[in-house]
Image (cartoon, rainbow, N blue to C red):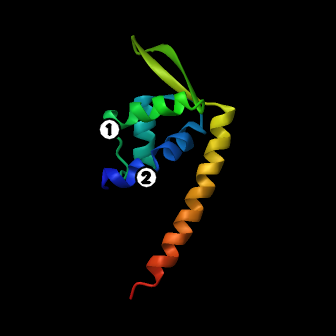
Amino acid sequence: MNPDRIRGHLSMLLLSVLAAGPAHGYALSAELRRRSEGQLVVVEGSLYPALHRLEDAGWVTSTWELGEGRRRRSYGLTRAGKDALREEIEAWRTFRAAVDHVVEEVP
């Protein structure tokens, strides 16, 4: 899938995965790929800047943990992040419905 299609929705997608519980970056990327049946592939160059933006917004917190003999950052959803996710999902549903109405008119 074209990465430009993902970019505008990456925050909602990451928040959706984090709603299931904290995860490190690689696990988030793998879960997005799994849930989308391989259609959504997010590379590190997009993933980590998006996570930092979510953290700066107060929607995600991060902690360092030791796993598999190395340090890695784990990300978790905040209460504000849960609220933001609900708003993002509602906005997505509105947008999706509008687009569906437009493309239904295509002969």
Whether label 1 touches label 2, CB < 8 Å = no
> Is 106 on the left or on the right of 3, as rendered?
right
Residue 43: % across, % down: 32, 38
SS for tag 1?
A: loop
Q: Earlier in the sequence, mark 1 or mark 2?
A: 2
> Is 29 on the left or on the right of 87, as rendered?
left
Q: CA distance from mark 1 to mark 2?
A: 15 Å
Looking at the image, is 92 positioned above or below residue 26?
Answer: below
- Give the amino acid at mark 1: Val
Q: Nearer the viewer, residue 31 or 107?
A: 107
SS for tag 2?
A: loop
Looking at the image, is 2 positioned above or below residue 74?
Answer: below
What is the quadrant of residue 98 in the picture? bottom right
- Give the amino acid at mark 2: Ser
Residue 63: % across, % down: 53, 17
Residue 68: % across, % down: 40, 15
Which residue has dot 2 on it? 36
Q: Quadrant of the N terminus?
A: bottom left
Q: Nearer the viewer, mark 1 or mark 2?
A: 1
Which residue has dot 1 on it? 43
Mark 1, Cα crowd under 10 Å, few <14 / some 14-19 / many 20+, is: few
Which residue sits at x=39%, y=51%?
6
What is the quadrant of residue 29 in the picture? top left
Residue 11: % across, % down: 50, 43
Mark 2, Cα crowd under 10 Å, few <14 / some 14-19 / many 20+, is: few
Q: Nearer the viewer, residue 18 or 55?
A: 55
> Is 31 on the left or on the right of 16, as rendered?
left
Looking at the image, is 35 positioned above or below residue 104?
Answer: above
Mark carried by residue 31: none
Which residue sits at x=53%, y=46%?
12
Q: Residue furthest front?
A: 57
